[in-house]
Image: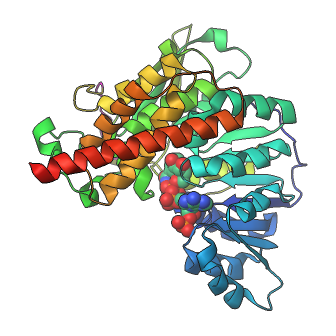
Amino acid sequence: MVNSSEQSVGSKRRVTILGSTGSIGCNTVDLIERHRDSYDVEALTCHRNVDVLIGQARKLKPSFVAVGDESQVETVEDALAGTGIEVGAGREAVIEAAARPADWVMAAIVGAAGLLPTLTAVRRGAMVALANKECLVCAGPLMMAEVAEHGATLLPVDSEHNAIFQVIDHERYDLIDCITLTASGGPFRTFTHAQMTSVTPAQAVAHPNWSMGAKISVDSATMMNKGLELIEAQHLFPVGPERLKVLVHPQSVIHSMVSYVDGSVLAQLGTPDMRTPISFTLGWPRRIAAPSQRLDLATIGQLTFEMPDPERFPCLRLARDALQTGGSAPTLLNAANEVAVEAFLNGRIGFLDIAKVVEDVLNVGELKRLTTIDDVHDVDQDGRRLAKTACERMSRADRVA
Ligand SMILES: NC(=O)c1ccc[n+]([C@@H]2O[C@H](COP(=O)([O-])OP(=O)(O)OC[C@H]3O[C@@H](n4cnc5c(N)ncnc54)[C@H](OP(=O)(O)O)[C@@H]3O)[C@@H](O)[C@H]2O)c1
């Protein structure tokens, strides 16, 4: 994974941020502004949050900005007229942003929509800071093969995988007993099943420790996020699914651990602020300063741990099963989850329906080997279609009741 198209340390790094207007994107922009002399910005992209994009473009002066939703592009063209910044619109423009010559690309688009742009950066051998876990979940084997083929460097941004990346022996997986992904447990960690039946989107997106986009916040609340991370971990650090563990750690101080055959356990710790892992990838292979609050263990006092409850959080089990099954199962799981989370956020299904939709889709979706990105696309579309049908059924049943 660390093939490295190693750009010489000390020279200015040219960077692109895919999804610059989201939570990870804005944190990345924040760090670049703090290290303005070390980075030039090639491209920024958004979907429809054009006001934030315009503000970022004025500050960072990229060569190119892309707006995914074409209906919003005129506002950006008008606002950036005369600045010399090129403006593109639509999916192709987002892909063009990834294709442009940047040494380092932050892949921070949410969901499978980030797959082709991320692959585009991988295919030109770039250093890719990977936040978009869904693209590894839905196309992991193909994506890792492309990373190897094109000599790209994949640097994990997810705090757990970034922690593992920092403490794992990249050469000797045979010396590893297991990898433990820590999980905060989300906002409903202590809720009973009955309490979870009536939780609202506002409650689900209010994560106790991390400030994140809506989709990943809901994924944390269902613990699907940890399931997606198990799949992501298997692609990044292929030690085998049976050696990947999950441990609930509500304080989110230990970001993950690697246990070695001699009994040593190496962990990375820090306060829950994504600017720490992002800065690790932005500076890699050197560290750069990040403004994250410093860790003060004496004030925190206690770190606690518990096993995840598979009864109340079935998404974790569904993701582990999909990982074991392989082939199209993780792609179906991801597509169904994206549709179900959106339906929940729009008030069309209940919180507990998310896992039911995913399970339904995994039960009826076609299981097959995926050999091309077109196969991934087809399975993703099938999963979405099946999930929409399941959501409609559940929302009708809800109205009748
Ligand atoms: N937030 C975190 O702390 C965190 C931690 C670990 C991993 N991650 C992962 O990082 C990724 C981004 O998460 P986030 O929390 O930053 O999400 P977010 O706040 O929702 O931001 C998502 C970004 O993707 C853009 N986008 C959405 N749909 C798009 C589409 N169809 N085409 C092109 N661009 C699109 C959004 O543009 P608009 O703003 O214009 O809608 C925004 O820039 C996710 O895969 C998540 O799992 C996030």
Position in image of residue 356 (x %, y %): 29, 35
Horizontal relation, residue 387 to residue 165: left or right? left
Position in image of residue 225 (x %, y %): 43, 39
Magenta part, dominant SS: loop
| Location of residue 17 with respect to 81 vertically, above or below | above
Residue in the image at 55% along x and 20% along y: 326
Quadrant of image for the N terminus: top right
Q: Quadrant of ligand 1?
A: bottom right
Position in image of residue 164 (x %, y %): 58, 31
Horizontal relation, residue 210 to residue 142: left or right? left
Q: How is the image coloured?
A: rainbow
- In depth, the one of 224 and 259 nearer the eye is 224
Residue in the image at 44% along x and 56% along y: 212
| Location of residue 35 with respect to 317 vertically, above or below | below
Horizontal relation, residue 94 to residue 343: left or right? right
Residue in the image at 48% along x and 12% along y: 242
Residue 345's image quarter?
bottom left
The answer to whether one can see residue 298 in this image is no
Q: Which residues are magenta?
A: 300-307
Horizontal relation, residue 368 to residue 338: left or right? right
Residue 201's image quarter?
bottom left
